[in-house]
Image: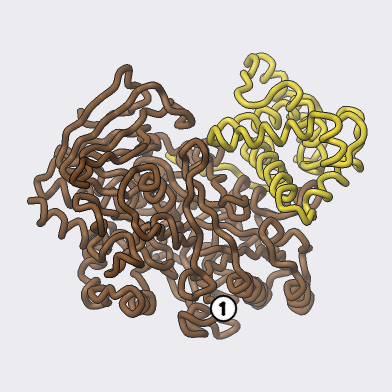
Amino acid sequence: MNIYDASHFDSDKTFDVDVAIVGTGAGGGTSAEILSHAGLRVLMVEEGPYWTAADFKMLESRSYPNLYQESAARKTKDKGINILQGRAVGGSTTVNWTSSFRTPSATLAYWRDRFALQDFTDEHLAPWFAKMEKRLSIMPWAEPPNANNDVLRRGAAALNIPAAVIPRNVKGCWNLGYCGMGCPKNAKQSMLVTTIPSALERGATLLSRTRAQRLVADTNGRVVSLECVAMDSQGIRATAHRITIRARHFVLAGGAIGSPGLLLRSDLPDPYRLVGKRTFLHPTVISAATMPEVVDPFSGAPQSIYSDHFLYVDPIDGPIGYKLEVPPLHPVLTSTTMTGYGLQSARAMENLRYTSAIIALLRDGFHEQSSGGTVELKNDGTPVLDYPITEYVWDGARRALQTMAQIQFAAGAKSVLPLHENATPYTSLEAARAAIAGFPMEVLRTRVASAHVMGGCGMGSAPKTSVIDGDGSHHHVENLSVFDGSMFPTSIGANPQLSIYGIVARNATLLSQRLA
Amino acid sequence: MNRRQWIGSGVAAAALLVVAGAYRFRALSESDRDILAAIGPVMLAGSLPQGDDAMRAFVEGFDKAVAGLTPSVQAEIAQLFTILRVPPLRMLATGVMRPWHLADGEEIARFLNRWRYSNIIQLRSAYDALHQLSHGAWYGNPRSWPQTGYPGPPKLS
């Protein structure tokens, strides 16, 4: 059997393979399938647990501590932004809400223009996106949207704001609404049920509960080994057991906080101090509405309607734009995200079945006042993202709160609560508008979240402004590639999973040809 | 189910909990639990029922939530509880002058508001930590769901 839970190890271990892949999310899973099918001996390292459909009980109290980084309570350095990021075999693909968009044309044009990534055209990438769409059964959701998403559809329609149906990576979906807790029906075509089993069938090895600590290079600057520690069965503390992985090539796919963190812990060249810089989040603000009808926002496909209208009102490098989507509302996620305590929070929770929410994902990284955050190491060597929110970004957050309130009232909301500590439910658009215009926009007053961590090992043609080239190869270390969301030189402006799948499919295929 | 019946059913559940045996705390000390016993009924006023059994469920849920954080964040939570526990620090940081078990709801609400709206970002983040852990602890528990109308996960055949 080639699947190991390192928390059960009773001694140190050594593995020898062709390619070691750190992380099993969108990037790691896609790489593992392509490289193992090219005949290479592949080993996947995953810090989280190996859980499968039978373990997914649709309970927040089980899923958040077990399947997310830091129990789904990961924060930026000043605690101002809550980050949802997976930590399990399958990475964030095991717990994401299935929205699948190709990289927007405007984003690719910006990369060609600013980072000299000349190959990154729609035409060049289209076959790679098409390949992964087919592999993961990605297509627009064919069922009607749930009532929560229908609020966005109706409100946008009433205001003549274009909105559309979200493509999802599902096959035989039961429309339950629990994608964020792990799909109990194996309907979500996450890495857990697609590329990873396929790589394992080709003889790949999977180590779960294994934390990658450090890459070790020889005197010629080639990475020779990856040092790991076995985690305990809860994934909280390291055990005494060390795991050494020797390989010809190393692939980083630990996510845009984990991958820069691993590089920062390793003694590898970074002459322009770029590792961890330009890390982006799609900072997300939230507006809750009380509807006259039952919404049951915990039920049904969590995300099925979106609007990109406010991404394209201004040029991409103008005032910050935002994508509109809808979040599922289960009791823990809702009560911890809603503002207020005591009776204010109790009343909000009593309204849960009538509550709908819209989120606005701000497209960061396309303006000089939006250079993202920086991944740093804490004293214990674990990574943390320092992400200051600039006035430029706050301006977009305020506009987004105005937009969402307008859409919710247009859809018939009885009241709207922008998630800000100073807010109360407003029963008219005029009242909401006036209040939002006056909010002090600061962290830990305005609720800000993120489920999309991108950048930190950005790609580009020039080593002075990028960590890796467009093929994902490290500029200074020959046998090291970065194949995950940390490769993006800006945010994507859309949920990033399909951008990772498509670009990594291309780059892992190029790598497999190089290593064959 | 009305509120009284709901509280009543909680008492029955408490009896079961006692039978089920003692929970082993992994993160919170006994004094931390006493502080939570004072703050919880204010933070969750209107949702956390009165009574030992609900309080026990809340404090155990809080402990589980803290135990699931990274060691460095657990250390920060421990510092937060030190500030709440040591009398001069408590008085200075929270404005609560009496020991927690004597402080009344109004005094504790004043403290929560003081941190929630503070101009000092660290105090706002400390409030947010208490808010997130308290709500996560209670609303992760199926006993909180009837009041919200959340039916729980669908039954799969």
Q: Residues within 10 Å of mark 1 (few under 14, many from 20)?
A: many
Q: Nearer the viewer, residue A261 or B134?
A: A261
Colour for chain B in the figure: yellow
Q: Nearer the viewer, residue B10 or A466?
A: A466
At x 7%, y 51%, the residue is: A516
Look at the picture and state if A19 lies above or below A416: above
Q: Secondary structure at mark 1?
A: helix
At x 64%, y 41%, the residue is: B136
Location of residue A353 by image quarter: bottom right
Q: Position of residue B123 (x, y in %)?
A: 75, 47
In the rendered view, does A12 fall on the left or right side of A410? left
For the N terminus of chain A, the quadrant is top left
Q: Nearer the viewer, residue A376 or A333?
A: A376
At x 47%, y 80%, the residue is: A317
Visible residue check, residue A282 = yes
Colour for chain A in the figure: brown
Location of residue A425 by image quarter: bottom right
According to the picture, the residue beneath numbered tag 1 turns out to be A156
Q: Position of residue A462 (x, y in %)?
A: 29, 69
Visible residue check, residue A94 = no
Q: Position of residue B143 (x, y in %)?
A: 67, 35
Look at the picture and state if A167 lies above or below B137: below
The chain holding disc 1 is A
At x 22%, y 47%, the residue is: A221
In the rendered view, does B147 fall on the left or right side of A260? right
Look at the picture and state if A110 lies above or below A97: below
In the rendered view, does A297 fall on the left or right side of A45? right
Q: Amino acid at mark 1?
A: Ala
Q: Position of residue B39 (x, y in %)?
A: 80, 36
